[in-house]
Image (spheres, rainbow, N blue to C red):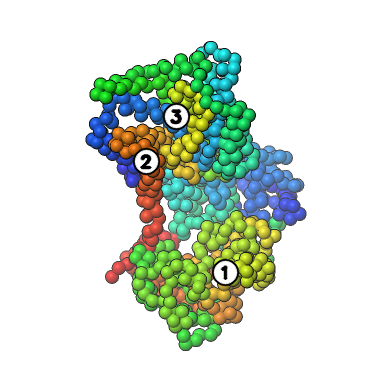
């Protein structure tokens, strides 16, 4: 129990629960199969990306280039597969997108490791380059006819829930498995490998990390390369989910994901953060943009509410810590 | 006894500056050896050479009888040499257990974390020195002393034969120092050698059997501690005889320059009244938590007092913020100059201008760099500040010189009252003596008042003409320095008769 009030995860969980029951009591539609499936479906992209962002922020870095990486990987892969008229297993599409993302991420990692510039500046630059490359060199546009293996996967579902009351049904896409795999993988890396502990150590104190014998440059290559690869896969997943390749589809996602991860208790200064927290943060933000409509709140309010939640969610725990720091602690002898 | 480490004829040059000239150092198994010397005497350079971080220009390094031509950090670690740096190099965000065991897990080239093993290693290591800290606690929630113990445990895990501690006591209370020394003695019994780097004389005498003194990068002497006394040691360190006499305030006017009446602040202090005259150095002392620091911060407006009145030259003033304090001619040299007194990454030039930037401007409102430079030049000469280029970051200066810059920064504002909180923490004995002399000259020549807040009893006793002792947030006695002894002053601080006596004594380390 100790310290619970100072943990963001606690407040986020409370808010999620409160929101669940509020929506349920107002609309009676929250705990229906199709709403829960819609929610799970909407979690796939932010969930995958948040896992990469979590690793970066724990290491003391930040990345705003991953949506550009995702879109560039996705677009060039689709274009390539169309060009060769690819008909083989769909996994190849994910591998190609992942590899393109990995290379772009490694470019980030290399610049960060060698120039030792703030990661925000590097990724602002590379993100703009990646996006510009896609628009200018690849002449990006919407591709609505996808390669056959990808469009086939778009129609593949794990299961479907029908809502008889409203006469609608929702299906959970097969690519949901990718989210589960990513979460398990990142949890394993962060908590069970020396690599993961090195990432925490790097975020705790970079000089101590070097002195302890970690190869800081190698850690940074991994961190940004991993994010790049993840972004490539997430981009491809987005194409599968939307059934078309829209080269602008993820613009602005960097802030959503960073907000979700911070909301889950990850400290922007590095060193602290959990998979559980990041998932809760992603869930809360997804719920706000997804289910607010069930409360009768128009969707264009979702950004506004998300902002309020970020301020209150992170402020509550910060305020507890601040209050404790401000106290003087001399013991005055009263008469 | 066998020799663990033997370095002979080591020299090291840094871009034309001779940091070490032909120095020698031998450490035997199970020996507690103290390496002493003023700021910039080459102690840190030698540590870095022994641990393989720097390569010596010439000289021989033998560890456990084996000669190394090119010693790498990994070689040093494998030979059992562990350095505990002043900043401790621990991870605040990781648990106690992980901090202790992480390095050794890394050396063993493990890829997968074995949490059970980490816990076991941490427990065994803590058992070795007889301590027990909560394994799962995050280190950022622990005290500096506990963090130090963790660094020691970590060194032990790597099978340390020689532990080098760089100024380990700087941030510790007396009670914590006492505990650290017990642990060092325990390590000695287990055959571990300790190289204790310090410039605090009392500690050198208390803990070490042998000592080596460096001055300006050269060996001055290596001897057994029993063969020297305090004065001789100071002479070795500074190359001159240092004897502090009592400061006696000369001019005492009718009206005090600064006066407070019945100042109170919740959880800080209560009913504080005192006055200070021109040309006087007033000492305020007390144990940690007695309210001395809270009072200092309050007088400077950081925690404004809730009740009571403040007078400057007989006029009532209000101090609600540091800006009010500066406007009224009050300067404050904080306890921790590194985090509170200086902008470490900024240049010496900018640091000296910062508190008085409003007057360092031309008529068109832009910064007058010529004026800043002339101020810098003036204080550099007056306080004999040793510094490189004025645009180098101030972090490149030694501790004593950094403290002089903090002082200069405030003197540049022409203060009427200067409050110094722990003015010589981390400053070596020679620089300390110079600083004290300078403060004495300051009150006599410029007619200002100085308040020194410190728990360094000799410092307060010798340099403050009047001393206020604080206990439990109140002033419990006022004494004239020449009318009391260090021992009596000490009893007043810890209050031997009262019910808190035991607690207080423990805190003070007796």
Marks 2/1: CA distance? 47 Å
Left or right of A230? Residue B228 is right
Residue B142: in sight, yes or no? yes
Give how far across and how far down residue B350 sits, in percent: 62, 62
Give how far across and how far down residue B374 sits, in percent: 68, 70
Q: Which residue is mark 3?
A: A45
Q: Residues within 10 Å of mark 1 (few under 14, many from 20)?
A: few
Q: In the displayed structure, would residue B283 be above or below residue A62? A: below
Seen at 48% across and 37% down, the residue is A252
Q: Which residue is mark 1?
A: B358
Marks 2/3: CA distance? 21 Å
Give how far across and how far down residue B94 sits, in percent: 46, 41
Q: Secondary structure at mark 2?
A: helix
Q: Nearer the viewer, residue A109 or B70?
A: A109
Residue B182: in sight, yes or no? no
Give me the disc on residue A301: 2
């Amino acid at each position: 129990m100790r310290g619970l009030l100072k943990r963001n995860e606690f407040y986020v969980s409370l808010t999620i629960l409160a929101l669940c029951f509020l929506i349920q009591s107002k609309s009676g539609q929250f705990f229906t199969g199709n709403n829960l499936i819609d929610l799970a479906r909407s979690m796939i992209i932010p969930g995958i990306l948040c896992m990469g962002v979590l690793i970066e922020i724990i290491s003391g870095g930040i990345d705003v280039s991953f949506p550009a990486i995702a879109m560039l990987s996705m677009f060039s892969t689709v274009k390539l597969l169309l060009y060769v008229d690819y008909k083989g297993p769909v996994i190849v599409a994910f591998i190609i997108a992942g590899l393109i993302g990995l290379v772009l991420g490694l470019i980030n990692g290399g610049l960060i490791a060698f120039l030792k510039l703030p990661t925000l500046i590097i990724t602002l630059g590379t993100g703009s380059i990646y996006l510009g490359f896609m628009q200018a060199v690849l002449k990006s546009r919407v591709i609505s006819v996808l390669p056959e293996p990808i469009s086939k996967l778009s129609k593949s579902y794990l299961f479907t829930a029908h809502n008889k009351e409203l006469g609608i049904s929702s299906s959970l896409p097969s690519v949901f498995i990718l989210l589960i795999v990513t979460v398990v993988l990142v949890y394993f890396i962060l908590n069970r490998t020396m690599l993961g502990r090195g990432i925490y150590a790097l975020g705790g104190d970079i000089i101590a990390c070097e002195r302890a014998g970690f190869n800081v440059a190698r850690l940074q290559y991994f961190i940004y390369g991993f994010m790049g690869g993840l972004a490539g896969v997430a981009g491809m997943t987005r194409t599968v989910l939307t059934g078309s390749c829209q080269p602008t589809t993820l613009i602005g996602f960097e802030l959503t994901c960073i907000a979700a991860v911070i909301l889950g208790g990850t400290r922007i200064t590095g060193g602290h953060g959990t998979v559980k927290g990041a998932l809760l943060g992603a869930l809360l933000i997804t719920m706000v943009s997804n289910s607010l409509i069930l409360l009768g709140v128009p969707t264009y309010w979702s950004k506004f509410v998300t902002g309020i939640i970020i301020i209150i969610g992170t402020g509550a725990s910060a305020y507890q810590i601040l209050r404790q720091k401000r106290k003087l602690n001399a013991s005055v002898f009263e008469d | 006894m066998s020799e663990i480490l033997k370095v002979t004829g080591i020299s090291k040059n840094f871009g034309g500056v001779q940091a070490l000239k032909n120095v020698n150092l031998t450490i035997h198994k199970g020996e507690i050896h103290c390496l002493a010397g003023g700021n910039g005497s080459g102690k840190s350079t030698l540590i870095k050479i022994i641990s393989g971080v720097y390569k010596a220009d010439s000289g021989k390094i033998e560890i456990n009888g084996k000669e190394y031509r090119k010693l790498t950090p990994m070689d040093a670690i494998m030979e059992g040499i562990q350095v505990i740096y002043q900043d401790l190099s621990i991870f605040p965000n990781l648990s106690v257990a992980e901090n202790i065991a992480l390095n050794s897990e890394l050396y063993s080239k493990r890829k997968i974390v074995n949490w059970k093993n980490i816990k076991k290693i941490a427990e065994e290591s803590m058992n070795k020195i007889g301590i027990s800290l909560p394994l799962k606690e995050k280190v950022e929630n622990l005290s500096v002393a506990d963090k130090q113990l963790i660094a020691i445990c970590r060194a032990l895990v790597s099978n340390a034969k020689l532990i080098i501690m760089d100024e380990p006591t700087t941030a510790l209370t007396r009670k914590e120092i006492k505990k650290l020394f017990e642990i060092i003695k325990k390590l000695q019994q287990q055959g571990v050698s300790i190289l204790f780097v310090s410039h605090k004389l009392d500690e050198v005498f208390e803990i070490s059997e042998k000592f080596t003194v460096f001055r300006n990068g050269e060996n001055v002497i290596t001897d057994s501690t029993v063969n020297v006394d305090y004065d001789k040691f100071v002479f070795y360190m500074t190359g001159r005889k240092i004897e502090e006499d009592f400061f006696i305030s000369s001019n005492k006017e009718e009206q005090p320059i600064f006066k407070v009446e019945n100042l109170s602040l919740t959880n800080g202090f209560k009913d504080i009244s005192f006055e200070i005259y021109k040309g006087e150095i007033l000492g305020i002392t007390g144990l940690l938590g007695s309210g001395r620091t809270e009072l200092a911060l309050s007088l400077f407006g950081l925690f404004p007092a809730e009740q009571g009145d403040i007078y400057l030259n007989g006029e009532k003033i209000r101090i609600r913020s540091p800006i009010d304090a500066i406007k009224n001619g009050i300067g404050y040299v904080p306890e921790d100059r590194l985090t509170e007194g200086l902008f470490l990454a900024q240049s010496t030039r900018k640091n000296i201008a910062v508190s008085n930037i409003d007057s360092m401007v031309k008529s068109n409102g832009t910064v007058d760099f010529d004026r800043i430079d002339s101020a810098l030049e003036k204080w550099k000469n007056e306080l004999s500040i040793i510094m490189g280029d004025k645009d180098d970051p101030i972090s490149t200066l030694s501790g004593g010189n950094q403290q002089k810059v903090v002082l200069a920064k405030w003197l540049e504002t022409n203060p009427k009252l200067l409050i110094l909180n722990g003015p010589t923490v981390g400053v070596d004995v020679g620089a300390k003596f110079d600083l004290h002399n300078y403060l004495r000259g300051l009150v006599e020549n410029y007619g200002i008042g100085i308040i020194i807040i410190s728990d360094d009893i000799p410092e307060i006793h010798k340099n403050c003409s009047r001393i206020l002792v604080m206990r439990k947030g109140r002033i419990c006695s006022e004494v004239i320095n020449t009318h009391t002894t260090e021992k009596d002053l000490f009893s007043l601080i810890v209050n031997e008769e009262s019910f808190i006596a035991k607690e207080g004594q423990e805190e003070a380390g007796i």
